[in-house]
Amino acid sequence: MTFTQKLSPWLLILPFTLPAQAYEFPEISDEIRDCYSKAMIGFDSVINARLGVPAEHALTYTYRSLDATPEQVQYLDNILIVVWGGYLWKSSPHNYAISVFYHCAHDAPLPAEATLR
């Protein structure tokens, strides 16, 4: 039996086992996921600005409730700041996403297990 014949069953199983574990991150806190979400919104905002998408089209992402009438609309201020900042950003979208993530993570409260007693 050749080396390839011995290895072939593992090569057939490997693609099915890797994706199941690639996206499981139970140890990441909700605060970090929130920061990641803001960074991706910022990333998209910079790209939208470069493509010429009007900033008004991005405002629906910042609504507190999608059911509100135009007179009742309230915005999520922190997301609104990220979107507008993305439209004004001059550097790369990646740099803006890193900046947003860093500032958000810096301002986020420490997880309970990391606080000093």
Image (spheres, rainbow, N blue to C red):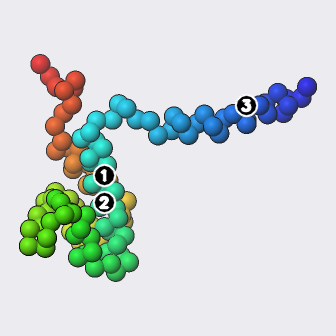
- The residue tagged 1 is 37
Q: How crowded is mark 3: few (under 14 residues within 10 Å), some or many (20 or more)?
A: few
Closer to us: 20 or 111: 20
Q: Can residue 67 be seen in this view?
A: yes
Are circles 2 and 1 on residues that touch, CB within 8 Å? yes
Q: What element does badge 3 sit on? A: helix
Q: Which residue lies furthest to the top in this view?
A: 117
**Residue type at the position of mark 2:** Ile
Side of 82 relative to 77 (left or right): right
Closer to us: 100 or 68: 68
Tell me where residue 115 appears, x and y as whole percent. 16, 25
- Based on the displayed image, in which of its 4 quarters is residue 26 positioned? top left
Q: Residues within 10 Å of mark 1 (few under 14, many from 20)?
A: some
- The residue tagged 2 is 41
Give the distance between the C-alpha atoms of the residues marked 2 and 3, in whole angstroms. Answer: 39 Å
What is the count of numbered marks? Answer: 3
Tell me where residue 74 appears, x and y as whole percent. 11, 64
Pick whichever of labels 1 and 3 is earlier in the sequence.
Answer: 3
- The residue tagged 3 is 10
Q: Residues within 10 Å of mark 2 (few under 14, many from 20)?
A: many
Give the distance between the C-alpha atoms of the residues marked 1 and 3, in whole angstroms. Answer: 36 Å
Tell me where residue 51 appears, x and y as whole percent. 38, 78
- Based on the displayed image, in which of its 4 quarters is residue 64 positioned? bottom left
Residue at the image point whose x is 85% and y is 31% from the top = 5
Question: Taking 41 as reference, is 17 above or below it?
Answer: above
Q: Residue furthest right?
A: 1
Q: What element does badge 2 sit on? A: helix
Tell me where residue 53 appears, x and y as whole percent. 33, 78
